[in-house]
Amino acid sequence: MEANTIQQVNPGKTPRLSGKKKVKQPWMLHFMVLPAAVMVFIFSYIPMGGILMAFQDYKPKPGLLGSPWVGLKHFEYMWQNDYFLQITWNTLFFAGTKIIMNLIIPFFFALLLNEVRKMALKRTIQTLVYLPHFLSWVTLSGILIDMLAQTGLINQFISSVFGIKPIFFLGDGSWFRFTIIFSDVWKEFGFNMIIFLAALSGISPSLYEAAEVDGAGRWKQTIYITIPALIPIAIVVATLALGNVLNANFDQVFNLYSPLIYQQGDIIDTFVYREGLLSGQFSFATAVNLFKSAISLILIVISYRLAYRFAGYRIF
């Protein structure tokens, strides 16, 4: 009788908790997050104190508190340095081209793979193109260096089939840029393809059935149903990638480049590595990286706003 009375008074309602109870109730969940929060604080927030080096003539012996302040000296030198402008252009070229190619190629490959009707063949192709994503650039770079060497497998094939001289893929600036972009797309396009395939699986089959009843073939179904359904997720992928326009993949370039192609292949991250760790120009390297981080932060904020405006995507 009591249970029936309670159900009549509050049908389908759950009791509300006060603010204190809300905090106390999931205390175990907060405790589980604590180790991760401590790790982020130690390895992500405490090192931010090193930003001060960008405004100092930093020396390891006196440290951050004892090194003299020089204001914006390193930033002024950065903008007066012609080589800095060159590596900025290289970074923008590599990152921008990778973003475009890693959007276009997965988009069309997902459309083609979606037309494969044999599930075994479809899953096999999907696995093969996705597999390189799990390999590190250290491993892939060793493979590429062996294959693209002047006596490597690729040059031997080109020489025997087309009868042309071996190409210096990793020693010629123009070919190096092509190699960097092509190898990155080959490694990563399978990941974005998975995103587009997931979006394709969410399209209602009734749309295709209705179009087929109206006499639309596979081509028209793709143009008027499939592609419009992929546009929102393509906008999200493109806008979120905008925040990485100054990240040209340090691991890839560092493992493949050499002094022969610094002018065409050097990027901001590899330049900071050489200036900071190899040459000991800690303050200048910090200033360059701080500039890159500030621009990246601005681009990330813009990209999230664009994703929310054009595709309704938001995290917070």
Image: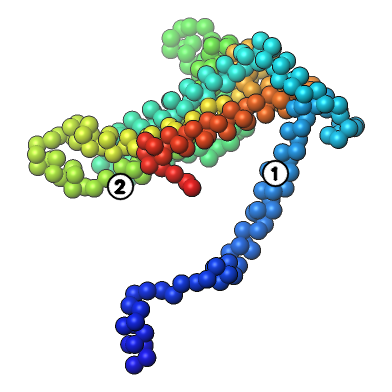
Front residue of 131/62: it is 62
Front residue of 212/227: it is 227
Residue 202's tag is 2
Q: Which residue is mark 1?
A: 45
Question: Mark 2 packing: few (<14 Cα in 10 Å), some, or many (20+)?
Answer: few
- Specify the quadrant of the image occupied by residue 114: top left
Residue 277's tag is none
Label 1's element? helix
Residue 58 point in image, percent of width and height = 83, 27
Instruction: In the rendered view, tell whether residue 203 sits above or below residue 172.
Output: below
Question: Mark 1 packing: few (<14 Cα in 10 Å), some, or many (20+)?
Answer: few
Outermost residue to the top: 164
Outermost residue to the bottom: 1
Asked if residue 150 shows in the view, the reply is no
The residue lying at 77 percent from left, 27 percent from top is 55
Q: Which one is in front in this view, the residue at disc 2 or the one at disc 1?
A: 1
Asked if residue 108 shows in the view, the reply is yes
Q: Earlier in the sequence, mark 2 or mark 1?
A: 1
Left or right of 202, for residue 280: right
Amino acid type for the residue under numbered disc 1: Tyr
- Specify the quadrant of the image occupied by residue 254: top right
Instruction: In the rendered view, tell whether residue 62 sits above or below residue 162.
Output: below
Label tally: 2
Residue 315 point in image, percent of width and height = 47, 46
Amino acid type for the residue under numbered disc 2: Gly
Outermost residue to the left: 214
Residue 67 point in image, percent of width and height = 86, 29
The residue lying at 64 percent from left, 54 percent from top is 36
Outermost residue to the right: 61
Left or right of 108, for residue 151: right
The residue lying at 19 percent from left, 31 percent from top is 219
